[in-house]
Image (cartoon, grey):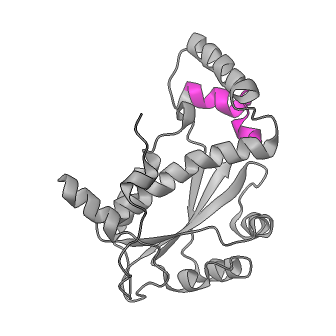
Amino acid sequence: MTKEEILSAFRYRHACKEFDTNKIIPKEDFDFILETARLSPSSFGLEPWHFVVVQDPALREALKENAWGAPKKLDTASHFLLGLTMKSTLMKWDTAYLQDFMRRVQDLPEEVIQGKSKFIEQYQKSDFELTDDRRLFDWAAKQSYIAMGNMMTAAAMIGIDSCPIEGFKQETTEQILKDKLGIDTDKYGISYMLAFGYRVVEPREKTRRCIDEVVTWK
């Protein structure tokens, strides 16, 4: 792709509020979008995310009550995704999960795992002071948002619209995830919702501050 084609995708992308219910995203296209999330970067490469694609109408209906920013998207989106983030029970430096992750997924030798664990401990305890469960979750959520951005950009590159959603009650939504979707909320919390589909209304021209207002060179 040329630079102009890439920028065109960024200009095309907008927070689509309503989708064409007659158009369904092909499986191969949505698999492509999910793959860009899977390949996204994260701090220490720890991948602190999980994505739940909610297609069941009854489950979408259950999410509506506590997701004030999502009803029209839940009704019309071709695909509706929940972006989950790992909690401290998985992401704290000394958890068995991280040890297994470095061994099983990252395929690191034991001496490297020991060194990396000490480095993550220092980072969490002093460098970023991730000293309580909420701080650690918010730090991990920052990584999950990288995956969200990549999914939206990838979708725009192939002509698919999206809308990121934070308009929901976090605690009560997590209770729904636990009760109706079988999510272990001791391990995962919800960071965002993300709707995908095809626009029914063309958006107005994108507005942004000029480059001189957002970039400083020294």
Asked if residue 91 lies in the magenta stretch, the reply is yes
Q: Main SS type for the magenta part? A: helix
Q: Quadrant of residue 113?
A: top right
Q: Quadrant of residue 191?
A: bottom right
Toward the left, the furthest residue is 2
Return the x and y of residue 204 as percentages of the image width and height: 38, 82
Residue 130, compared with residue 165, is above or below; it is above
Return the x and y of residue 166 as percentages of the image width and height: 63, 67
- Determine if residue 57 is in view: yes
Residue 102, compared with residue 87, is above or below; it is above
Screen quadrant of the C terminus? top left
Q: Quadrant of residue 206?
A: bottom left
Q: Is residue 129 left or right of residue 12?
A: right
Return the x and y of residue 198 as percentages of the image width and height: 37, 80
Q: Is residue 45 left or right of residue 22?
A: right
Q: Residue at x 72, y 65 (%)?
A: 177
Return the x and y of residue 65 as percentages of the image width and height: 73, 82
- Determine if residue 28 is in view: no
Residue 50, compared with residue 72, is above or below; it is above
In this rendered view, identify the residue nearer to me: 6 or 22: 6
Q: Residue at x 59, y 31 (%)?
A: 101
Identify the magenta region.
88-103
